[in-house]
Image (spheres, rainbow, N blue to C red):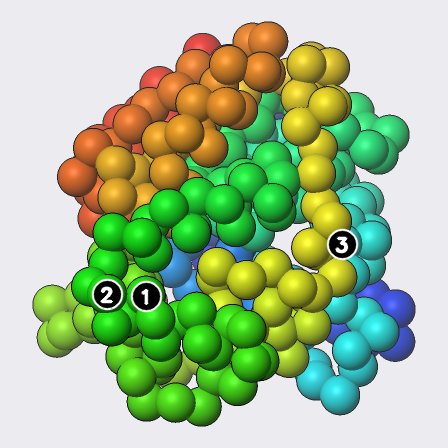
Amino acid sequence: MKITEGYMPFLDYKTYYRIVGESTGNKKPLVLLHGGPGSSHNYFEVLDRIAEEDGRQLIMYDQLGCGNSYLDGHPELWTREVWIKELMALREHLGLDEIHLLGQSWGGMQALEYVCNYEHTGIKSLILSSTLPASWMWGEEAQRNISMMPKDMQEAIKKATESGDYSDPAYQAAEDEYMLRHCAGALTDDSPECLRRPVKKGREAYVVGWGPNEFTPLGTLKDYDVTAQLKDIKEPSLVISGGNDLCTPYIAKYMYDHIPDSEWELFRTCRHMCFVEDNEHYVDILVDWMNRHD
């Protein structure tokens, strides 16, 4: 399987990209937007098999501020506008005229922001994987999830959130438990290599962009809200979420209910990374979807 890596000049910096497989005329490439902000493309490598099994090219990249595009000390860069311009620049740089666009978590916010608020062409379909249409909705659903945690953990989270001091070990234990329930399990020797590989996470990009944790959106994205624009989305849209996801079934159903041409696939036993936790089913669903919408 052919893998091509490279860098695109962007602003005064550079953006790393990774292309899996080769382009074919009939099957449009899949562009993948990772989460965070400040995560990296690494976990998407569990989808590399699509290039061979479906004869379709995959393009993934590390957004500015993380992974092989790591950068910090530039809080002015961690805004949705910069990351959307980076996506637009990458499409132009690689000649990606017609694509399927998959965004997971923050990447899905990015995809929605792009199609709702920017001029765009050539998007054959959207795949909205464990994502959200509004920061306030994520925060509200997070509080509902927290209310189902042990009382002492609820109190530790409340105390840290109100004081802005997140250094208490009791709070850190509560945050770990929240993420274990709704995001992902601990890495083991059996975890895919791409998850175990060391990576430079963009902590500054995350804190400045989103906030101190998943349940307190305080950063530059705190006012993100495309709920009013969902009804105007023209692209066929596949909503994917897990039964125990940070993206709760309520959030997923909200997107499904409000995007006109949409389908929703609920991975009932999964958390925030359905594509890792039920890779077989995820790949099957994705391949079928893209072949229906090429």
Q: Residue at x 51, y 14 (%)?
A: 257
The percent position of residue 14, horizontal first and vertical second, equals 75, 72
Q: Residue at x 70, y 32 (%)?
A: 226
Please, what secondary structure does the residue beneath circle 3 have?
Answer: helix
Relative horizontal placement of residue 12, taking residue 178 as reference (left or right): right
Please, what secondary structure does the residue beneath circle 1 have?
Answer: helix
Q: Earlier in the sequence, mark 3 or mark 1?
A: 3
Q: Nearer the viewer, residue 175 or 88?
A: 175
Going by the numbered disc 1, the residue's amino acid type is Gln
The disc at residue 151 is 2
CB under 8 Å between callouts 1 and 2? yes
Residue 111 visible in this rendered orientation of the protein: no
Q: Residue at x 41, y 29 (%)?
A: 250
Going by the numbered disc 2, the residue's amino acid type is Lys
The disc at residue 80 is 3
Q: Residue at x 17, y 39 (%)?
A: 269
